């Protein structure tokens, strides 16, 4: 269908509500109205109801890896789709909805909703009335289709912690886990209507069976894992289904891609046990990677032998995930073969196995976050050792410490440029949060921190040699560099710190709150 006036880009609560109101006012179709998020949106009240039943008129909400967050405020719901309204929501996280004596804290659907490549998490409904759908409530007469998505960590005081439905639901390659309710199905509760399910996980939910369909009106399209059920009709061994066992999933985490996911652990029964016509997983990874598709929203990447060359963000994330799974002592090499642009943060580098380390060789190429809100080029987890060299790291724009690199482990950084990154926290270019940094021949330039340390924020141990820190900005202290927190120490040897700006004190460098700086 034609566009209803192009794409409306929104970055605030007011802009989102205004865009919904504009869609609601479209009087003639057929056409598609598109709303694209340009940043994370924190809600102070429920978003405007999405309500346009005009024939042929539909709404697409492109989350672009951003989050709509109700912040846990009572009475706040993420989205409400009204009757006969057609909506597609893609690549979004909806979290923090919190309702009392109402249904559907994350999303309430009374129309026709398709949810793809998204995560619904941390939403809650409470109260003494019959409430349900902590994550999503699908009302009587409504149609809900969910593909390549994760419903996790939602709760209901009564029914359907993940999804509660009185209408028709279709699930394809969906992971529903870690939700809770007291009755019906803690992952999925169908009171009336129907459920069509394929290649999906409903497992690891608590307080009631993972899946319950009161009427038993279930169409099993096969290759599902359901840990516990009541009247959902999934038979172990039939149609490739697995019943009665744990899915063996990791925690909800950044595993690459636009939204957080649950990565199957090694030995999980869902690996190579699925079947779907979808060609990618929630993260954009191609399916299948192994002998068959994996059940659920995430496809485990078949790991090649190291060293590994990467040319895309997906390949980089896959290689990091493979490194994270290594258990044999050694130095594992990942090499860039071209510039890589990101639309979401890379997979956190996390392997604390003794003797295991990653060497990331840039070969003169760049990893670029493109200034997209919420995107951080690299994060190194506690206990993890990483060497990064011959690279440019730019365009990061996360809300928390470390615009370009966040280090909780240990980083050796050489022959690198860290530039044009921004953070809502500390360390516009690099933040060391309890870990260690050894750097030489680096340039940290043109970065911005809304907190301290426009270029470098040091709350750990470190040294920088033969390097330049220039043209950075901190809204707080330490425009170029700050060493802070008791016991934090950094040694600077032949380092130029120039032309940095602080909107408070210490434009060049600052030692604060027990931190120290040694100059050589």
Image (spheres, rainbow, N blue to C red):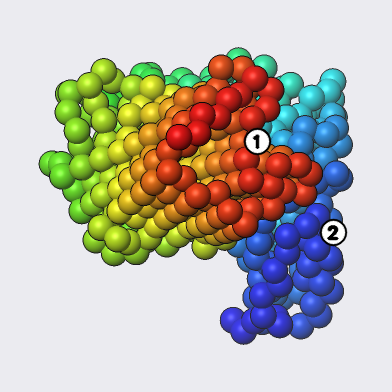
Counting from the top left corner in percent of width and height, residue 279 is at: 33, 57
Lateral position of residue 345 relative to residue 54, left or right: left
Q: Which residue is mark 2?
A: 14
User: For mark 1, does the 10 Å Cα neighbourhood hold few (<14), some (14 to 19), or many (20 or more) residues?
Assistant: many
Q: Residue furthest front?
A: 520
Whether residue 163 is visible, yes or no, is no
Lateral position of residue 318 relative to residue 291, left or right: right
- The quarter of the picture where residue 350 lies is top left
Counting from the top left corner in percent of width and height, residue 383 is at: 38, 22
Lateral position of residue 185 relative to residue 125, left or right: left
Whichever of labels 2 and 1 marks the residue nearer the N terminus, that label is 2
- Residue occupying image coordinates x 19% and y 48%: 308
Lateral position of residue 14 relative to residue 412, left or right: right
User: For mark 2, does the 10 Å Cα neighbourhood hold few (<14), some (14 to 19), or many (20 or more) residues?
Assistant: some
Local secondary structure at mark 1: strand
Q: Nearer the viewer, mark 2 or mark 1?
A: 1
Counting from the top left corner in percent of width and height, residue 416 is at: 37, 52
Measured in 3D between alpha carbons, the distance from the residue under mark 2 to the one under mark 1, in whole angstroms, is 39 Å
**Residue in the foreground of this view, choosing between 72 and 189:** 72
Q: Which residue is mark 1?
A: 510
- Which quarter of the image is occupied by the C terminus? top left
- Residue occupying image coordinates x 71% and y 82%: 5
The circle on residue 316 is none
Local secondary structure at mark 2: helix
- Residue occupying image coordinates x 42% and y 48%: 467
């Amino acid at each position: 269908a034609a566009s209803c006036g192009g794409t409306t880009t929104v970055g605030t609560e007011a802009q989102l509500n205004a865009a919904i109101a504009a869609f609601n006012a479209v009087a003639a179709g057929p056409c598609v109205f598109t709303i694209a998020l340009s940043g994370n949106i924190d809600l102070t009240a429920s978003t405007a109801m999405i309500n346009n039943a005009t024939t042929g008129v539909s709404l697409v909400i492109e989350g672009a890896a951003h989050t709509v967050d109700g912040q846990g405020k009572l009475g706040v719901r993420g989205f409400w789709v009204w009757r006969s309204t057609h909506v597609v929501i893609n690549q979004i996280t909806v979290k923090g909805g919190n309702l009392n004596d109402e249904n559907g804290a994350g999303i309430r659907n009374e129309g026709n909703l398709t949810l793809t490549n998204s995560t619904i998490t941390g939403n809650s409904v409470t109260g003494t009335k019959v409430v349900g759908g902590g994550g999503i409530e699908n009302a009587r007469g409504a149609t809900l289709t969910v593909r390549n998505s994760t419903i996790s960590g939602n709760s209901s005081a009564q029914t359907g912690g993940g999804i509660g439905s009185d209408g028709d639901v279709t699930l394809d390659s969906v992971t529903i886990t870690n939700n809770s309710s007291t009755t019906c199905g803690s992952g999925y509760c169908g009171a009336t209507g129907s459920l069509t399910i394929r290649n999906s996980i409903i497992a690891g939910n608590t307080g009631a069976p993972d899946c319950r369909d009161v009427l038993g009106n279930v169409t099993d399209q096969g290759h599902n894992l359901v840990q516990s059920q009541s009247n959902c009709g999934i038979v172990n061994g039939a149609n490739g289904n697995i019943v009665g066992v744990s899915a063996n999933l990791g925690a909800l985490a950044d595993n690459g891609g636009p939204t957080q996911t649950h990565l199957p652990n090694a030995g999980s029964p869902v690996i190579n046990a699925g079947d779907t016509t979808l060609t990618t997983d929630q993260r954009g990874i191609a399916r299948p990677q192994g002998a068959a598709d994996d059940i659920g929203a995430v496809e485990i990447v078949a790991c090649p032998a190291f060293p590994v060359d990467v040319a895309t963000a997906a390949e980089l994330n896959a290689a990091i995930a493979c490194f994270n799974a290594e258990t044999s002592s050694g130095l594992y090499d990942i090499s860039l073969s071209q510039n890589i642009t990101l639309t979401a943060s890379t997979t956190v580098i996390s392997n604390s196995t003794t003797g295991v380390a990653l060497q990331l060789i840039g070969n003169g190429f760049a990893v670029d976050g493109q200034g997209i809100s919420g995107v951080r080029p690299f994060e190194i987890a506690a206990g993890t050792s990483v060497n990064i060299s011959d690279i440019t790291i730019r365009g990061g724009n996360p809300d928390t410490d470390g615009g370009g690199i966040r280090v909780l482990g240990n980083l050796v950084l050489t022959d690198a440029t860290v530039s044009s990154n921004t953070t809502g926290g500390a360390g516009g270019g690099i933040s060391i949060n309890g870990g260690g940094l050894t750097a030489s021949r680096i340039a940290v330039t043109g970065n911005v921190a809304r907190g301290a340390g426009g270029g470098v924020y040091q709350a750990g141990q470190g040294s920088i040699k033969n390097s330049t820190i220039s043209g950075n900005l901190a809204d707080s202290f330490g425009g170029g560099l700050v060493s802070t927190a008791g016991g934090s120490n950094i040694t600077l040897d032949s380092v130029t710190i120039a032309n940095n700006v602080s909107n408070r004190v210490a434009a060049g460098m600052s030692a604060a709150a027990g931190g120290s700086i040694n100059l050589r």
